[in-house]
Image (cartoon, coloured by chain):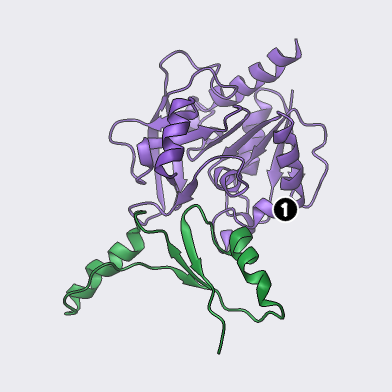
Chain colours: A purple, B green
Amino acid sequence: MKFGVLQFPGSCDEVDALAAARRVGDAELIWHGQRDLGGADAIIVPGGFSYGDYLRAGAIARFSAAMESVIEFADAGGLVLGICNGFQVLCEARLLPGALLPNANLRFTFRQVHLEVVAGETPFTCACPPGAMLSIPVKHSFGRYYADAATLQRIERSGQVVLRYGAGENFNGSLHDIAGVCNERGNVFGLMPHPEHAVEELIGGSSDGLLIFQSMRLAVEGARV
Amino acid sequence: MLIRPKAGILDPQGAAVQRALPALGFAGVENVHVGRLVELDVEDAAQLEAMCEKLLANPLVEDYEIILPE
């Protein structure tokens, strides 16, 4: 199982994403100008401030050469995980529904949050125990999930809401407390919290983030058998 | 191009400005929204709409208005 981790100018969490992915498989960086995804079985679009996040978070990164390949990879059914800025990039690329707007509190906010796994059967959550609550950090300024009413109704019905902020944890004002969504096909997933920062109890007090990477490995290797 | 948050979407930046103005003695201020202005020179103005749709605005959450000089 090989993960490919994208790296844009301004990415800052690609190293942690690489380290987290290497706990469950092989992983390599993919520079943003590179069209070749190096035979990766799954792609991670990491957190940070791609291209400085000028204009809107993720708006420019979405047109990079590597993202062109990621869009084709996703269209062919490949697994794509977007974390924080990566989630914003995937929304801008229209691989995921909705958009991420400035936090309701207008502040960069860094805290540990509890997340409810709403959809436990996805390729990104299938290693989570049923009814799991995950303890994972968030750190962002633009994390308020927004989609229009019709889209919200559609994604709720089709089980695309994968993670919700636990009671009292929705500091950014996300609609329906949404912290993570997948596409209709279920192979593209984005979340604002950072599972790659919660893989070692000694450092983060939680290794719940590993479950996301373990789920992806299960999904990829299950599909191979 | 003037780019504005779509009506009905929470605009915390506008709300913060709306709270600040009365504190400075400006009364009767309502419906404050903060957007952005993109100015550019271009030979073919017919491209502007596509620019807004593709990059300059996010049509899911923003409205845009194209203003050409007289």
Residue A148 visible in rendering? yes
The image position of residue B23, as x and y in percent, is 18, 73
Would you name the residue on which mark 1 appears? Answer: A64
Q: Is residue A212 above or below residue B67?
A: above
What residue sits 53% from the left and 43% below the top?
Answer: A84
The image position of residue A9, as x and y in percent, is 68, 56
Q: Is residue A154 left or right of residue A75?
A: left
Q: Is residue A35 above or below residue A198?
A: below
Quadrant of the rendered image containing residue B12: bottom left
Mark 1 crowdedness (10 Å alpha carbons): few <14, some 14-19, many ≥20: some
Q: Is residue B56 above or below residue B67?
A: above
Q: Amino acid at mark 1?
A: Ser
What residue sits 57% from the left and 25% below the top?
Answer: A124
**On the rendered image, what quadrant is the N terminus of chain A found in?**
top right
Is A138 or B50 nearer to us in this picture? B50
Quadrant of the rendered image containing residue A106: bottom left
Q: Is residue B42 above or below residue B61?
A: below
